[in-house]
């Protein structure tokens, strides 16, 4: 019964994710009309190729790898591209940045309320992730980081046991993937993003072991 509950919980989580098509630098925006025949602000979509990183490469390239909680939306940017900045609090630093002297930081995500980037859901306060991060420059908020590989470097917490790599499966994580659960999800999930469900604590240990080797 517990296993069935976990499967239903994860399927419900994945059904909330939006599929996307990877087309290089495709931008679309259309105006809409609501039920009162009033125009509302258009929501556009940006479909873009992103640089991706294999597991070991992502660990080396990241300046900070942390399990964290999104606590607050700060503001949106439109120039030079659509982005949103959030406040976040570190739950556990896995690869620490010596320049960061607090558990509080800012995370910059591609997209905003007017533009959807690669079909990605925007972060919401209370959500928890493991993120691979790089220092952002020329941003007024202190301790701001951008996400290495964007959605391919996002691991969203499903429950205490599992996290979901939100795009592009990595063979290096196959040994900690919940294969039976993945089989169940394959039957119901139609996303082109190759979402990969993996064991959270085993993933953190895998990162730590890689850091010790290097």
Image: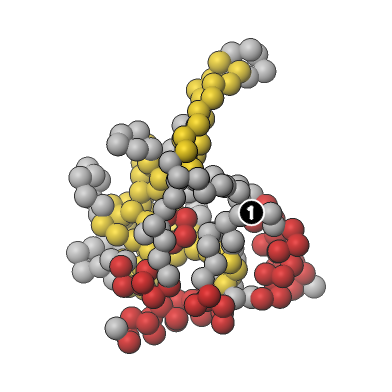
The structure residue drawn at horizontal position 47% and vertical position 55%, both measured from the top left corner, is: 151
Q: Is residue 91 visible?
A: no
Residue 26 vertical position relative to residue 167 in the rendered view, above or below: above
Looking at the rendered structure, the secondary structure element under dot 1 is: loop
Examine the image and state in which quarter residue 38 appears: top right
Give residue 91's position: percent from left, percent from top. 41, 66
Q: Which residue is tagged 1? A: 191
Give residue 161's position: percent from left, percent from top. 59, 73
Specify the farthest residue to the right. 1
Looking at the figure, which quarter contains the N terminus?
bottom right
The structure residue drawn at horizontal position 39% and vertical position 75%, both measured from the top left corner, is: 56
Q: Is residue 193 toward the left or the right of residue 137 in the image? A: right
Residue 81 vertical position relative to residue 125 in the rendered view, above or below: above
The structure residue drawn at horizontal position 55% and vertical position 67%, both measured from the top left corner, is: 169
**Near-viewer residue (62 or 129):** 62
**Near-viewer residue (98 or 137):** 137
């Amino acid at each position: 019964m517990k296993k069935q509950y976990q499967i239903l919980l994860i399927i419900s989580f994945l059904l909330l994710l939006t599929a996307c098509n990877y087309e290089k630098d495709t931008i679309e925006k259309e105006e809409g009309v609501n039920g009162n025949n009033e125009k509302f602000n258009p929501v556009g979509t940006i479909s873009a190729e992103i640089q991706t990183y294999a597991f070991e490469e992502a660990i080396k390239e990241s300046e900070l790898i942390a399990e964290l909680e999104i606590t607050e939306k700060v503001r949106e940017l439109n120039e030079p591209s659509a982005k949103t900045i959030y406040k976040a609090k570190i739950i556990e630093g896995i690869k620490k940045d010596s320049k960061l002297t607090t558990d509080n930081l800012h995370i910059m995500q591609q997209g905003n309320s007017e533009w959807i980037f690669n079909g990605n859901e925007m972060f919401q306060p209370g959500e928890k992730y493991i993120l691979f991060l790089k220092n952002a420059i020329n941003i007024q908020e202190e301790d701001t980081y951008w996400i290495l590989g964007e959605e391919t470097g996002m691991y969203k917490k499903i429950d205490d046991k599992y996290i979901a790599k939100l795009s592009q499966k990595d063979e290096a994580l196959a040994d900690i993937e919940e294969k039976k659960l993945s089989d169940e999800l394959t039957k119901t999930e139609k996303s082109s993003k190759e979402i990969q469900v993996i064991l959270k604590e085993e993933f953190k240990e895998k990162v730590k072991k890689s850091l010790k080797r290097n």
